[in-house]
Image (cartoon, grey):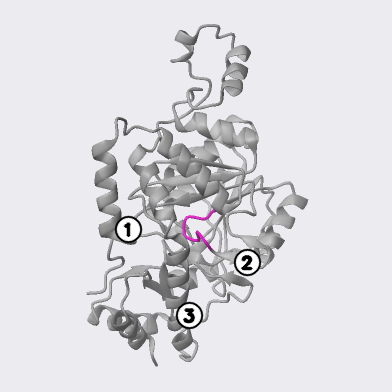
Amino acid sequence: MIPLMKNAFLHEHETKKALADFILNSDKLSMGEKCTEFETAFSKKQGREEAILFNSGGSANIALLQSLKNLGRLKEGDNIGFSALTWATNVMPIIQMGFNPVAIDSGFITLNLTSDAILKKIRDTKLNGLFITNALGFAGDLDNIKKLCEKNEIILLEDNCEALGTELISGKTGNFGLASTFSFFVAHHMSTIEGGMICTDDDELAEMSRMVRSNGWDRNLSTSQQLKWRKKYEINSDFEAKYTFYDIGFNLRPTEITGFLGLYQMQFIDETIKCRERNYLLFEDVLRKNPDLEYIYHDDITVLSTFAFPVICKNIDLKEKYMKRFVDAEIEIRPLIAGNIQNQPFYSKYVKEKEKLPQTDYLGSNGFYCGNYPELTDEDIETIIGCITK
């Protein structure tokens, strides 16, 4: 059996031993210093000014949109475009915040939104925000998308949960929008078991995100930020301030275990990215010789950080043929994310109007993937390659 993932962590035994020692010797396991240290290290690695740690990538998504709503930068009824080939937690917060979700076709050549697709959409639909998904480690032409959003006053956000470490000629994915989100779920590039992050260069947004993370109070803000909020609402008592809630928030806090694991696993992140890229390119070299399968364009990507091997067949019959090969070889597979997210039950329940998205439908109908991770052996890779050989 080749599972979707083999271990919870890279260097699993070493990591579990270090975690056990940390827990046994820690006086505090609720959110504290380790979380802050991880935020500082991650923001430096990603190249952004601020990083705010959450208990999951999905929590980071909902906190980001709630923060923008609290700040008045997005309002109920605003049109928020999103990549149609995506995960549920990229879209659900748009609905939960009372925004109007606008699905945009994800191109099968890149798996992602392109500036052309967005330009086509905004000719007939005004967008206030755009929440793109850098799917499975790939990305569209993010530099052009950024310029297009700036020109049309669209707030650009990146769900980078599946593309930690991917770099384009013009920069790292996750650094093109006002803010980006990351996931540290066990099957992703770096594991804290569960965990997520918001990254941004916007001080006001980072401040609000920290408040949204913790019930809307000021407890995790700097002293000057706390004084600002207390002065604004005439809170003159430190005692009263402990239970004063300034805006809508949730309890989306991580634990010190999350912070410790994040810090510990960061020492291996370059190693895992290189290994995943090497594995993928071995796979791709065979895939490109098979006329039954689509090639995913990534010529403008200088570092390809993918945790999966996508297989996109040219019709449904071929998909059934190749899926059977994988199943017979005991390789665990999954649908291509959630396919066209508009076809999911929750979307049909809450959103009555659907967009015509032929390329996303093509991807959902004809695609699937298996896992890509450093623990794959040479034998595992040869087994996978055998399944996609013509």
Cβ atoms at labels 3 and 1 below 8 Å apart: no
Looking at the picture, does residue 149 appear above or below residue 331? above
Can residue 76 be seen in this snapshot? no
Residue at the (36%, 85%) spot, across then down: 385
Q: Amino acid at mark 1?
A: Phe
Q: CA distance from mark 3 to mark 1?
A: 23 Å
Q: Residues within 10 Å of mark 3 (few under 14, many from 20)?
A: few
- The residue wearing badge 3 is 281
Query: In terms of depth relative to the viewer, which is nearer, 52 or 144?
Result: 52
Tell me if residue 92 is in the magenta stretch: no
- The residue wearing badge 1 is 9
Query: In terms of depth relative to the viewer, which is nearer, 9 or 5?
Result: 9
Specify which label sits upstream in the sequence, 3 or 1: 1
Q: Main secondary structure of the magenta part?
A: loop
Residue at the (33%, 42%) spot, across then down: 257
Work out which quarter of the rendered image holds the N terminus and state it: bottom left
Q: CA distance from mark 1 to mark 2?
A: 27 Å
Q: Amino acid at mark 3?
A: Leu
Which SS class for mark 2? strand
Q: Which residues are magenta?
A: 159-165
Marks 1 and 2: which is nearer the front?
1
Which SS class for mark 3? helix
- What numbered label is drawn on residue 249? none
Residue 384 at x, y = what percent?
Answer: 34, 82
Specify which label sits upstream in the sequence, 2 or 3: 2
Give the left or right position of residue 87, taking residue 115 as reference. Answer: left
- The residue wearing badge 2 is 168
